[in-house]
Amino acid sequence: MGDGLRHDLDALRKEAGLAVERAESLEALEEIRVRYLGRKGMLTRALRGMGGVPEADRPAIGRLANDTRDEIERLLGERRDGLGRMAMSKRLLEEAVDVTLPGIPARVGTKHVVQQVLEEIEDVFIGMGFEIEEGPEVETDYYNFIALNFPKDHPARDMQATFVVNPEIVLRTHTSPVQVRGMLKRKPRLPLRLIAPGRCYRRDPADATHSPVFTQVEGLAVDVGVSMGDLKGTLAEFARRMYGPMTRTRFRPSYFPFTEPSAEVDVSCTVCGGSGCGVCGGTGWLEILGSGMVHPHVLENGGYDPGKVTGFAFGMGVERIAMLKYGIDDIRLFHGGDLRFLRQF
Ligand code: PHE
């Protein structure tokens, strides 16, 4: 008598199994579960036929009904896992990042060539016992001129093409004001050896060799018995370290209000070695700096007694040193911001 029910349950299981196999989503699976196993589902409905089953067959049918439920649940679970795996691989495929693609490299900057050459110059002088000193770019007329022996109406001021802020304030035209500032800061320390790097400004029209903003390195040494020979030896050694051991130096008389005597210093041409070429205009020499023995008035303004100590000083243009080192023919390139130029260094 239970045979009909047995058959129904069997058919139910097969039908549910097929539906599960075809289900394409978790929602579809849930629908199937409700349809077959829900409170008002097909299984419950089929078991309504239990009433007609003989007492003796009921436990077996009951067990079969439970097995059918378990089996359908197992099939649902398997399919649910399968769909989950498929969804995951689909997502992985869609969201795949190709880690073998070359990245976009971040461009690393470089030190500006003027800064590089400045640091080279600093290294040479630090190696000779000089220390670094700094001063303001916006300077007083006193430190830029008066303390350096340029009285208010002195004609030597004309050479300095000054940006004047007001009668007492200027943009410094050279790093020489740091001579006096540095001495005042240290007096009466001996020996005193300092270099002062920094930006300077002059009201010059920009051309291949002039720029209204440029960089200088000042040097100052004060001690008992410092001589012109010390100046020559120091600068000759600097030139050899900077431009190679065969570099020669030449001192030509010159004039600065704050040094006496004064000299312009030339190095043997860095291109032709001294035989004469286009870069040195056939002379074999290139001018690199101004220098001299510190004027007694300047020592006094720095708080030192010119009767007891002497000193030498020099000042060089860093852009000029860099131009000679790398064969750069236009000073405007340094401050023009053209990366094609700057990236070469
Ligand atoms: N300050 C001078 C200039 O810029 C250079 C210099 C420095 C000369 C120190 C002598 C001594 O023209």
Image: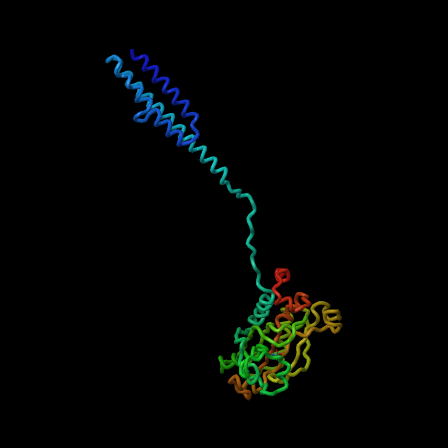
Residue at the bottom extreme of this rendering: 307
What is the x, y in percent for residue 209? Answer: 67, 72
Image quarter for residue 331? bottom right
Which quadrant would the C terminus be assigned to in this image? bottom right
Which quadrant would the N terminus be assigned to in this image? top left
Residue at the left extreme of this rendering: 55
What is the x, y in percent for residue 24? Answer: 44, 29
In the displayed structure, 60 sits above or below 181; it is: above
In the displayed structure, 86 sits above or below 192; it is: above
- Viewer-proximal residue, 125 or 184? 184
Image color mode? rainbow
Can residue 167 be spotted in the picture?
Answer: yes
Image quarter for residue 342? bottom right
Give the side of residue 88 with respect to residue 218, left or right.
left
Can residue 244 be spotted in the picture?
Answer: no
Which residue is at a point 27% across and 13% down the rendered structure image?
53
What is the x, y in percent for residue 264? Answer: 66, 79
What is the x, y in percent for residue 277? Answer: 75, 69
Which residue is at a point 51% across and 42% down the rendered structure image?
97
In the displayed structure, 63 sits above or below 107; it is: above
- Viewer-proximal residue, 236 or 6? 6
Residue at the top extreme of this rendering: 1
Location of ligand 1 given as a quarter of the image = bottom right
Which residue is at a point 74% across and 74% down the rendered structure image?
283
- Viewer-proximal residue, 327 or 95? 95
Which residue is at a point 68% across and 82% down the rendered structure image?
253
Give the side of residue 337 with respect to residue 71, left or right.
right
Give the side of residue 36 with respect to residue 336, left or right.
left
